[in-house]
Image (spheres, rainbow, N blue to C red):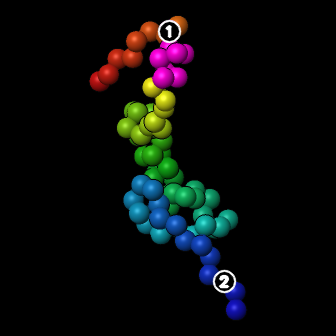
Amino acid sequence: MPKPPLTVECPTCSAPVEWSENSPNRPFCSDRCKLIDLGAWAAEDHAIPGNELEDDLFSEDMPPRRDH
């Protein structure tokens, strides 16, 4: 008996997504959800936390960040 395909949740809308070649936008369910997520990264709504010490050490050459 074949194993059922792995199913993951779309990070944008939580719809189930089959993790296979049948889902070219995986882990997203659609192009729309993929673009929504990309827009959130571009707007800095998503961020990967950094190390404050490294930010202080390596940011001397950069202008100060403007917070919105």
Q: Are marks 2 and 1 in contact (CB under 8 Å)?
A: no
Residue at 70 percent across and 86 percent down: it is: 2
Density class for disc 1 (Cα within 10 Å; few <14, some 14-19, many ≥20) is few
Q: Amino acid at mark 2?
A: Lys
| Furthest-front residue in this view | 53
Q: Which mark is residue 7?
A: none
Q: Considering depth in this image, is 23 or 55 the residue closer to the camera?
A: 55
Mark 1 or mark 2, which is nearer the start of the sequence?
Answer: 2
Q: Considering depth in this image, is 56 or 43 the residue closer to the camera?
A: 56
16 is higher (above) or lower (below) than 26: below
Q: Considering depth in this image, is 63 or 58 the residue closer to the camera?
A: 58
Q: Is residue 15 magenta?
A: no
Q: Which residue is mark 1?
A: 60
Residue at 46 percent across and 51 percent down: it is: 32
Q: Which element carries disc 2, helix, strand or loop?
A: loop
Q: Which residues are magenta?
A: 53-60
Q: Amino acid at mark 1?
A: Glu
Look at the image and tell me in which quarter the C terminus lies: top left
| Furthest-bottom residue in this view | 1
Q: Is residue 56 magenta?
A: yes
Asked which quadrant contains residue 12, the reply is bottom left
Residue at 43 percent across and 66 percent down: it is: 15
Q: Which mark is residue 3?
A: 2
Look at the image and tell me in which quarter the N terminus lies: bottom right
Asked which quadrant contains residue 14, the reply is bottom left
Q: Residue 27: horizontal and vertical position, in percent?
A: 55, 58
